Amino acid sequence: MDEAFIRIEKVTKRFGGVTAVDAADIAIGRGEFFSLLGPSGCGKTTLLRMIAGFDFPSEGAIYVDGNDITDLPPHKRPSNMVFQSYAIFPHLNVFDNIAYGLRKARLPRAELDRRVEEALAMIKLSGFGKRRGDQLSGGQRQRVALARALVNRPKVLLLDEPLGALDKRLRESMQIELRQLQKSVGITFVFVTHDQEEALSMSDRVAVMSAGKVLQIAEPRTLYEAPNCREVADFIGTMNFFDAIVTSRDGDIAVLDAGPLGIVRAPASQPAGAAVLIAIRPEKIVLSSDAVSGGVRGIITASAYLGERSHIHVMVDGVTEPVSVAAQNRHRDGAQHNGGEVVYLSWTPEAMVILPRA
Amino acid sequence: MRARGRADGVGLFVYAIFYLAFLYVPVLFLPLFSFNNSTFISFPLSGFTTQWYVQMWADDEVQHALANSLKVGAAAALVSTMLGLPAAKALTRYRVPGGTVMLGFVNLPLFIPEIVLGISLLILLNTAAIPLSLITVVIGHVTVCVPFAITVLMSRMEGFDRSLEEASLDLGETGWMTFWRVTFPLVLPGIVSALLLTFMVSFDDFLIAYFLAGTQVTLPIYIWGQLRFPYKLPTVLALGALILLVSCILVIAAEWIRSLGVRGRRPVVGA
């Protein structure tokens, strides 16, 4: 990713008095599977629609492959879109739906037929050309929408929550298929979703958005293991937070006064005196019934058995929220965790993420 | 509880029967007496005949008035539907500044008494020195037909996913071609329905035509004229019965066509 294929520069979109997208800066590489992730109303769909040309930025500019497309109408853009509702034309059959863009491009008949047949084969719907849109299942409609966009060989494919309407099992198999398809066609995908697991499992990189702002752009692993703020840490997976103050520094290591957790040392960049949050993932916490040195004493308030793991809530004196612990059930006769039981929590210094406290 | 619910159901049923009877029994007298073998409109019926229909059909004046009404109706329907289509698209698809207010003004002719509308149009045409003719009747009818056309077309436009038009733009079509390749075919049932409905509104109108027709005669004006002659009443009844029948067929057809295509168009969700 030496040069950015799609550049979104300081893009702001206001609807009346509402700022839907606030100074978004994103660079997407050629052939990248890039996701826009965030809760509904965070501006991710508005951003996608500005790349597609259905909405226009109030400020800022968008470049694709070096060309400024900020003010181009949708039909002049090198992108195609898969809509959330799929938008299969109900008055046309599958063949004519897929051929829609090619007809506009006035392709020779033989070439058009060949490309549509290829597209039908790609989505494993050969022989479905004569079917009407309303005779297709949800999964089939999704594939047709995908083929209708890809058959035009766009530089960028935009996908607006394309798996949202499918049931869980189908969604999971489509996630894998979509990812394989993207790798084989090599087209840059910009994928909008509110489902964090979907974003993590499919994307090369993810931009997390909230209230119109881009909070963090990173690879899935980085987003999960090294979130840059409380909102990202909270939105992706489960996270425990503890208030702390940096008391002194020792090279790259900060010494923190974490109140009920005692004095802890962790890699961090904040200066002495800074108010910070210690963030720890539930699965990074080790739970034991015997006292361990440096362990934090707590009492189990609730536990849920989920098969491969158990979720346990532990109340620690001086901490308002119960601490979430995820314990792998490695042994068939593994320890039972009962409410009221006294336990000790411990973790490695690397398990802690030190975040600024707003 | 159960018995009580059933009693309520019976009450509602009786109410519904009375309601329907109130609406339709007077109307049904029209076809009933149009087949009665007597010039007097009274019970008991004296015998079955189709002579009034034969007599009506043989009347040149009826045929002339009918032709005028058909011409005016067709013209008013075409013009008002063509005017309504872009308005409905704008009001459903774009954020038109003051759109709600505009829609209110467009719908206003529905609430202005037709007699007021007729007189004001007459004054306007007189002031502009435009001679009264069937064309002026068409102009008058268009003002009351446009709101009907817009209402029918708007409900149709709102009924389909707006991302269908966006998909067409996204696939490289211009706005104009998107209208012809996507919007028009999907709105077509609404267009046919609007044509039928506006035709009916024009065809049935008496008051506006009465003011604006000048020396021309449309079917309702002809019927009004015939009511002065008691012996002509049965043929008028026959004519009325026929108009009733055709109106019913057209309105049912309009509704059927409008609902057509809405069915089965809902996106299928799931596998």
Image (cartoon, coloured by chain):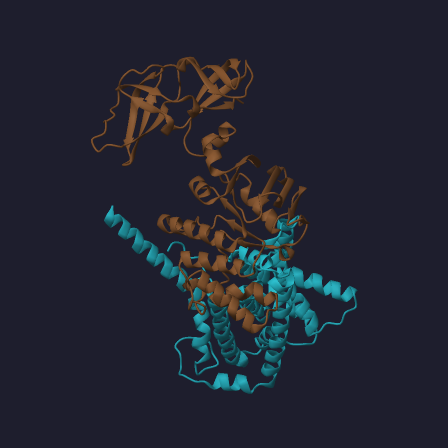
Query: Which residue of the protein is positioned furthest toward the left in this rendering?
Result: A333
Residue at 51% from the left image edge and 64% from the top image edge: A97
Q: Which chain is brown?
A: A
Image quadrant of residue A284? Answer: top left
Residue at 40% from the left image edge and 54% from the top image edge: B269
Work out which quarter of the rendered image holds the N terminus of chain A and state it: top right
Nearer the observer, A275 or A2: A2
> What is the x, y in percent for residue B263?
43, 62
Nearer the observer, B86 or A299: A299
Q: Which chain is cyan?
A: B
Q: Is residue A354 above or below residue A145?
A: above
> What is the x, y in percent for residue A139?
41, 56
Q: How many marks?
A: 0
Side of B2 where B263 appears, left or right = right
> What is the x, y in percent for residue B176?
64, 63
Q: Is residue A141 visible?
A: yes
Q: Is residue A36 above or below residue B230?
A: above
Work out which quarter of the rendered image holds the C terminus of chain A and state it: top right
> What is the x, y in percent for residue B74?
61, 73
Nearer the observer, A35 or A138: A35
Nearer the observer, B172 or A335: A335
Q: Is residue A15 visible?
A: no
